[in-house]
Image: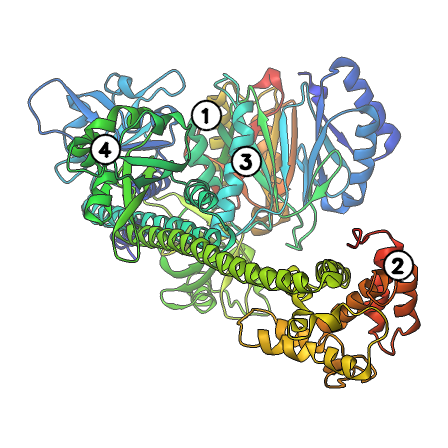
Amino acid sequence: MNREQQILTVLYEMILAISGEVSLKPLLTKTLQQLLYHTSFPAGVVFLEVPPDSGAEVVSVRLDGAVGDFGLIERVGNILTLPRALVRGDAEVCEAPDLLAPLSCATAQYSTFFRLPVNHEGLILLLGQNIPHTELPLTRIFQPVMANFAKAIELCRHNDAYTSGLVVQRNQALEGVRKVNRALKTLSAGNEVLVRVADETSMLQEMCRVAVEVGGYRLAWVGFAQSDEQKSILPVAQSGIEADYLRQMHFSWGDNELGRGPTGSAVRTRQPQVVQDIRDDRSYAPWRGAALQSGFAAVLALPLLDNEGNAFGALTIDAAEANAFDSEEMRLLSELANDLAFGIINLRNRVERRRSIEKLRKGLEDALQAIASTIEMRDPYTAGHQRRVAHLADAIAAKLGLDPERCHGLHLAGMVHDVGKIGLPAEILSKPGKLLDIEFDLIKLHPSIGYEILKDVEFPWPIAQMVLQHHERLDGSGYPSGLKGDEILLETRILTVADVVEATFSFRPYRPALGIDTALGEISKHRGVLYDGEVVDACLALFEQKEFTFDQPK
Amino acid sequence: MSVAAMHYLPSIEEPVLERQLASWRSEQPQMGVLALLPEAEGAAVPKLQEVCARLNIPLVGALFPALVESDTFRTQGAWILRFDEMPYANLYPDLPRESDRLHAAVNGIVADITPNLGERREVTLFMLFDAMVPNIATILDQLYLRLANRVHYMGANAGSESFTPMPCLFDGSRIVQGGVLVLLLQPHHGAVLEHGYGAPPQALQATSTDGNRIVQIDWRPAFEVYQEMAKAHYGVEITRENFYQYAVHFPVGIVRANGMILVRIPVQLEADGSLFCVGEVPPNALLTLLSAPTVDSVRTLNALAHGLTVLGMPPRGRDVLLFYCAGRRLHLGIDAAQDELRALTQRFQASGIAGVLSLGEIGGSTQWDYPLFHNATLVASYWGRSNV
């Protein structure tokens, strides 16, 4: 291999090393490094845009890269003013300390340079204190490298532009994902609020809190459309800033200046309304000053629609950055508003339904009370008996851990358990002394009569069954059907014990009041035989622990 | 700094060592020590650490294949070199190989160094690498990109001449491997590096390399071409069996555009026919096969002496720190190398020469030269404050 071939091979190596770079900054560094390595100059600089020659003695040119000189590395990107004789000219190795003065500093004094033009616009200067020893014509051999370097610069510029375009696209995509994630998190947390919260005020407040704390929005508030003359919108819940902010504001859903902002328009048009940049949106003028002061930049207002599609209010969300809401985020937040509206309507319907049920129940209970009063009027000896049985049965049931609804049903059954006596002659009911068998047989009919009276009334509880069974006994010795054990409703087993205790405790036409000890002795004696053992125990515990006392029988 | 700032201990005996250090410390209470030991004395490192710890003297050092004491190679004893004031020193073990981690490691080294640079112009970044670190040239390039001309660059590789991995860098409490010991000498004017190898006309291209390995030359297995070149130009038949005997005599030269040669000594023949060198070989580098007769010792020594003069003053009457490449000694042969040392001693007329047999060297031919990682060179520098 002769010297020319060697040079070509070295150049080939250099070109391959340089062309491995795909970005401009590393390309400049690599090229300078390669040139320093191959020439033994200690430092080098590169200028990519040398202005056309105007004949001036000095040239202002931006320094695009430097290797080997810390002072010059720190000046990369700055405009340097250099002598024309240094910048202009062909490839040259030259000793000229004066020309190099602008590139020298206290820490590096240069006396020699190696100038390498790059096409017609660029320039590389290798700098040193002495001309490095070489037997080769440096000024000629690097020309092919410089030609290749010029092409590599173009390619790297294109690639950098393309890459930065990709970076912008990627950042946009990431921003989109971030926004959608934000909206999704808000939606998910909002749905959790709908499931968890049982009253409207808390629901509205929680939803606003979620939008701000989970979603990261700056302000969220709910306003309800009013039917007043101004068609005003009244803020009813908010989160994110001090309450005073909205208190100072006025909103309307009418077609007027205060109604043409996003919130009013959302209610009026029943469509989501967005202001991506409040600084230049004319419709936002009435609120702009205060909003900017509070750090808002974009606003999204979402209508709250009832089942008929009418807007009864709006959820308004303010963000700190302009163009904060993209289409996917708006879609998800609209879903949140729809869920909130559904939650509000649902809550309101639930309250209404509960009221109706309460009313109905009250009507039934009033009717039962009327029936009870009727029987008590006919039978003064049982006056108050049903009421006291009801109270005791209720207490035993609670002691046994029955839920309040079931206890209440038992209470009502106790109130009317002797309603069947209405069909018996009053003389028998109030007869002093022992009843004849035939009279007792008549008495035994009262559970069935009571059942007949109540069986067609629709209660949420088996009241007619309880009335029918309340004289059945655990061992099957009761009447009217001789039911045993579990064939008898638990409520009835409780009612039976309460009935026996109250009856024994109280005065009867055929005997005096026997007192509570006798009453409790009676159920203890027949515990597990006539009466349910657990029910008896609960009843005994109530009295022993003084959790229950009868009021004075009449 | 007096002549006594460089002291050779023929054997490492605790009382002698302690006496010498205590004597120094009485003159220089802020002193520190750079200890250079031959690999055969590796077991003495804990002893050195103990004595320095006892005397509260900062210590750094490294193990090399051998020492150079004036004009003689020594495999016993130790050089202890005194810093009048201990400079900034840091030991970085286990340097990474992967590009990203290496980048971070170099950034870390630069971040550690930078606050210690001070305002002085004349600062030398003195690096002692474990020779088994495979990417020293890359590390050097990265350091130069960041520190540029804020420092002079000087260094050498430590370790075993058999290239067996071993902990070879130490400070007062640790002895590590796979890393670098970094010192900031200031004021210090750097070092001069020279090898005196000429480029023969025959040159071929490394068509495939992988860090320190030359995989292919001229698109053929590297060893095959290496064998042909040795046979054609020097009439030597190199086989797998005699590779280790001959390879050091036929190092590879990387030709630069200015005709200068960067020497790489093959130290291992891989099973796939690739040649493992001390120091990286750039992809597509132009390679040439060098041989002993192409070394010009006289030119080398003159260049070194001239270089030292340019650094500030002629070497006569000064203390000189010398790194003499182990590969060069193998290449020249022990007698020729010994002759070269004697010639250097006579040429320099230095008051003292403390040196080691190194496994690769870092520096430039002149001050503020582009720093490179070399093999087969001599690196000379002044030691001590009065000599800089």
- Measure the alpha-carbon separation of dots 2 and 1: 107 Å
Q: Give the residue number, with chain letter if any, for mark 1.
A: B150
Q: Give the residue number, with chain letter if any, for mark 2.
A: A516
Q: Are marks 2 and 4 on the same chain?
A: yes
The percent position of residue A385, horizontal first and vertical second, equals 74, 61
Tag of residue B109: 3
Crowding near pointer 2: few (<14 within 10 Å), some, many (20+)?
some
**Marks 3 and 4: which is nearer the front?**
4
- Measure the alpha-carbon separation of dots 1 and 3: 15 Å
- Measure the alpha-carbon separation of dots 2 and 4: 80 Å
Q: Amino acid at mark 1?
A: Arg
Query: From the viewer's perspective, is B198 left or right of A401?
Result: left
Residue lying furthest left: A54
Residue lying furthest front: A427
Labels 1 and 3: the sequence-earlier one: 3
| Quadrant of the drawing holding the N terminus of chain B | top right
Q: Are marks 2 and 3 on the same chain?
A: no
